[in-house]
Image (cartoon, grey):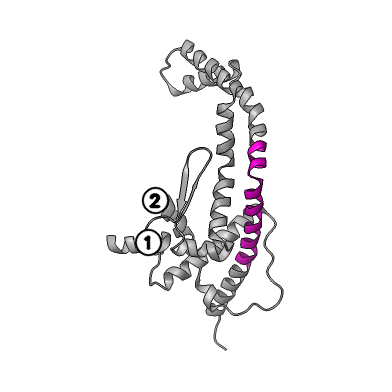
Amino acid sequence: MRGLRTACAAVAALLLVGCAAEPSGPAPVPPAAERDQDALIRHAQRVLIDGCLDRQGLAVARKPSSSQESRRLRNALFGTGPTELSLTLPTGHTVRAHTDGCLAAARHTLYGDQRRWFRAEVTVNNLSAEAAARIRDDPAHRAALSRFARCLDAAGPTRTPAPEKGVEQRCAGESGLASVETRLRPVRLAEVRSLRRDQLTTHTRLRTRALHRAAEISAAHHGNTREKGSASP
């Protein structure tokens, strides 16, 4: 299950929050590269979730010994009962999440306001899908798509995937579908980014908070790890 794998990856993380000593010296600075920032947040989330599970006598490092233990682990990770967070996107798709469980607790520690982060993250992650829906509704795209379909019908059935792919590429070019999509994609994406400007701003602000919090958590975690591994004087 994708959610379980995600949360399991999130499982190295809460031990710090209750037991780490106050950091000395300047606060750690998050990395500049976006890929490194993503890795830092994922690591801090793992630390937080690990600690949360550890306090409940659970761990994802080992395989559950029974269906009951597996269910207990899943509930601890993702929460139980009806989902408290829900957002229906302009595309019609509804995304839901819990506010309890170790994953939610880790996100609360990193981002602060769970509801604001959930709404901003879901919105921002689906901007491309929203733009694609607008492209499909565009009259120029609908007309090109009709020409594309007629081209495929005229080509007739194919026996192997390779010729079929070649026919689709030819029809996309001849119908103008490829050029219409290329032209409309940046325009519609700019439209949805403008419409969702508030959520983009919120997403940036909360992610910046999470980066600084993750840097502190990661630094404390590494400090604790070194201390546990060092020899006694």
- Give coordinates of residue 11: x percent, y percent: 47, 63
Which quarter shows the C terminus? Answer: bottom right
- Give coordinates of residue 27: x percent, y percent: 69, 71
* In the rendered image, the vertical position of residue 182 relative to residue 211, given as above or below: above
* Lateral position of residue 67 relative to residue 151, left or right: left
The residue at 69%/65% (across/down) is: 29
- What amino acid is found at the position of numbered circle 1 in the picture? Asn
Residue placed most toward the observer, 31 or 163: 31
Residue placed most toward the observer, 43 or 198: 198
* Lateral position of residue 128 relative to residue 92, left or right: right
The residue at 59%/41% (across/down) is: 127
* In the rendered image, the vertical position of residue 140 relative to residue 229, given as above or below: above
Secondary structure category for the residue under label 2 = loop
Residue placed most toward the observer, 33 or 102: 102
- Give coordinates of residue 14: x percent, y percent: 50, 70
Q: Which residue is mark 1?
A: 75
Q: Which residues are magenta?
A: 190-215
The residue at 67%/41% (across/down) is: 194
Packing grade of label 2 (10 A; few <14, some 14-19, many >=20) is: few
- Give coordinates of residue 23: x percent, y percent: 64, 77
- What amino acid is found at the position of numbered circle 2 in the picture? Met
The residue at 58%/63% (across/down) is: 112
Label 1 with label 2: CB-CB less than 8 Å: no
Q: What separation in Å lies between label 1 and label 2 (alpha carbons)? A: 14 Å
Residue 117 can be seen, yes or no: yes
Q: Which residue is mark 2?
A: 1
